[in-house]
Image (cartoon, grey):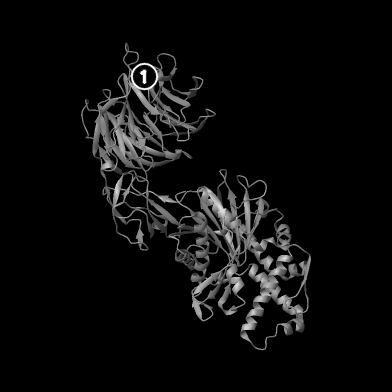
Amino acid sequence: MDEPVLVIDFGTSTSSAVLVADGAARPLKEPGSGSYSWPSVVCRDGERLLVGVTAERRKRSDPAAYRAEFKRDLGQVAEIPLGDASYPVEHLVAAVLRVLRDRAEELHGAPVDRAVLTVPASYGDGDARRNLMVAAGERAGFAEVDLLPEPVAAALAPLPGAGFGAGDLVLVYDFGGGTFDAALVRFGPDGGHDVLGHRALDDCGGRDVDAVLIDHIRTAGGDGLAESLHDGGSRMVRLRFGLQLGDFARGVKHQLSEVDAVEDFVTAAAPPSHVARAELATLIAPLLARTIDCCHTLLRGCGVAPGNVAAVLLVGGTSRMPVVADTVGPAFDRLLRRPEDPDLAVAQGAAELELRLPPRRVEPEVGTDITAPRWTLPGGGGRLVRVLAGPGDDFAPGDVLAVARDVTGRLQRLLAPPFPGRVEAWTVAVGEPFASTDAPARVARTGSALRLLDPPRLRFRHDIFKEKVFDVKSVAFSADGRKLVFAHQLCSAWTYEAGTGYRLETNRWSAGDNLDDADVSPDGRWLATAAKDGFVYLWDTTINRPRKLRHGARVSSVHFSDDGRSLVSSGWSSTVRVWDVTTAGCSLQFDAAPSYVLVGVVRFGPGGRVIATGTRDATALWDTATGQQLVAIPHDAHVLGLAFAPDGRRLAASYDDGTVIVWDTATGAPVLTLGERQTGTMRDRVTGVAFSPDGCWVAAGHRGAVIWDAVTGERLGQAGGPDRVRAVAFSPDGLALACGGHQSLEVHEIAVPR
């Protein structure tokens, strides 16, 4: 997490907040009451707006200056009168949010500039109330305000006992102080969840229960209660009696959650008021029936039968009433679950989500004009909310330059281009809109981007089997950078300690089965080799024992996925096969070329969702879930090497005509052509190719190893390396380049100018 964030559940009756900072979530306790539920009320005191318990204590002194439950007024044009002054509703909301922010900063000891505000599910995209809540948060002093539907947050609230499991469908029944929200949530295997649908009632909540109970108490009290509340025509006294009767009804309601009947007095002069739990259940039965109908409508809309729901999750303060569980249980005949604290469920669930998920980030698109990056936001555009790197500020690749709000209302962090640079200017001011086709910033590359190879400094060189001629076919670093594996055509793969050149392992098989390729899994445990006998040899390096995976015709290329769970192979037939590393079973196969055309190179894309294949006349991208072709790139040269950029948006291909072309993986359009095209039979072929870990460089095997700038195409330098380098690989930190060629292997350090 980049910075602290305050998660706020602003409710009709009460609000709660959780400070998320330093990897922990801390609920905020109201100092005046010691409660985690802050009354969502205000009272004007001169030029000040008192909030929470302080306002509650003040209300009887000046009831006309007091207001509660104003959340329901959001979106109305009329201002709210408080004494002899009036305020827009969002100003009152801002007053509550500001007090919560002040308390969070007091506890954190530093500014808290980010807020996540939970809102009812009825505040959908395009609803004016969303903008009003954002405006209230900004008025309260938050530089960044994001919104989250309350049922989404409630689904992640802490539960007694075991949590929900993968595949569980959960109906969230959120009965709050002012609204009722329902959501259908499916939980995933990784603890995440998807919201399949939601419904809401804006006029059904604890406030409506109070109104029904107040009418009942007035009616049951008859003339005796009316006489005790008679004020002789004084408006101020009427207001005070109204506040007192409301407090009394809420007190009765809360008591009936614990006892079967309540007898109490509205005033000392009033007759006793008797209310039984059964009476209350009868009084609010129509309200509860509306909530049940809302849930059934939601389930029908999602195409889900009640019997397929694993549980109903009861959240919101009003759900504490026993009659709610007594009604909801029989209506759905499902297990009822409650969070540890229904009043805090929404805020705690939102805090859990904030801890679990990183902020949304958008990488820039850098075209031929690298000084004008563009960011594609959901919906095609947004508004600039906050600038984090102003004119003159330096940035590193991946830094957050600014924050924007997309058209759906969600905040997106705009990342720096994949090179070090400096912000020259923002062409869009904070608060102004921009489209994804616009370039809202101008940037310049700085000198640190022009990192060159030192004059090659040899770390280690090995001449193995000097009596025989052989070529290094492939090189690969383990993910931690500690191991370097290379395979050569004489039936062996060698593993070295990358820093010292100390030999760790040798994997050897029968003579005559020459190798064409090898790869090492990210954890360094598994080694895969491609042999001409039609098998992929999958080595467990901890026991130096292989499993033979039958591919078919001669295997030319193998590559592990990022997570090391899958292995892809290709060869002299048209078939590409994907293997499960654990079971050694084939999970997918497809034809990548006309029958028995050599598929010379195959590579997984980042995340393992895409496979790239290269043949003598085409490069193609394939969906690893279905084997369907996504993009086809025809050409008239033979592909000898493939490498994805770290973000997966670019694919570098090396060819036997001496060039490297960088392609856009979404469109198949060429982005850069590196090197000079050659013709004739003696042309210099470019073999292995690799992107640096930050995506800034492309290295390729040639006569030595050449490094280009991956954005501008500028040639940065060349490592002498072995004659005719056939394989290249960057170390995970990007500060070394391994080069394998004719009878040798070298590792060169990369200099970074300061």
x, y percent for residue 74: 52, 70
Viewer-nearest residue: 340 or 621: 340
Give the left or right position of residue 589, taking residue 292 as reference.
left
Q: The C terminus is located in which quarter?
A: top left
Viewer-nearest residue: 12 or 193: 12
Quadrant housing residue 644: top left
Q: How many labels does the image show?
A: 1
Residue at 43%, 18% (x, y): give it.
506
Query: Compared with residue 259, is residue 187 higher up or lower down, i.e. above or below?
Result: above
| Amino acid type, residue under disc 1 in the picture | Gln
Query: Compared with residue 166, is residue 179 higher up or lower down, i.e. above or below?
Result: below
Query: Compared with residue 693, is residue 224 higher up or lower down, i.e. above or below?
Result: below
Residue assigned mark 1:
489
Give the left or right position of residue 574, taking residue 269 as reference.
left
- Residue 284, can we see it? no
- Residue 256, can we see it? yes
Quadrant housing residue 404: bottom left
Viewer-nearest residue: 404 or 30: 30
x, y percent for residue 690: 34, 33
Secondary structure found at label 1: loop
x, y percent for residue 494: 40, 20
Give the left or right position of residue 577, taking residue 702 as reference.
right
x, y percent for residue 625: 48, 40
Residue at 63%, 52% (x, y): give it.
170
Q: How crowded is mark 1: few (under 14 residues within 10 Å), some or many (20 or more)?
A: many
Viewer-nearest residue: 464 or 59: 59
Residue at 73%, 66% (x, y): give it.
255
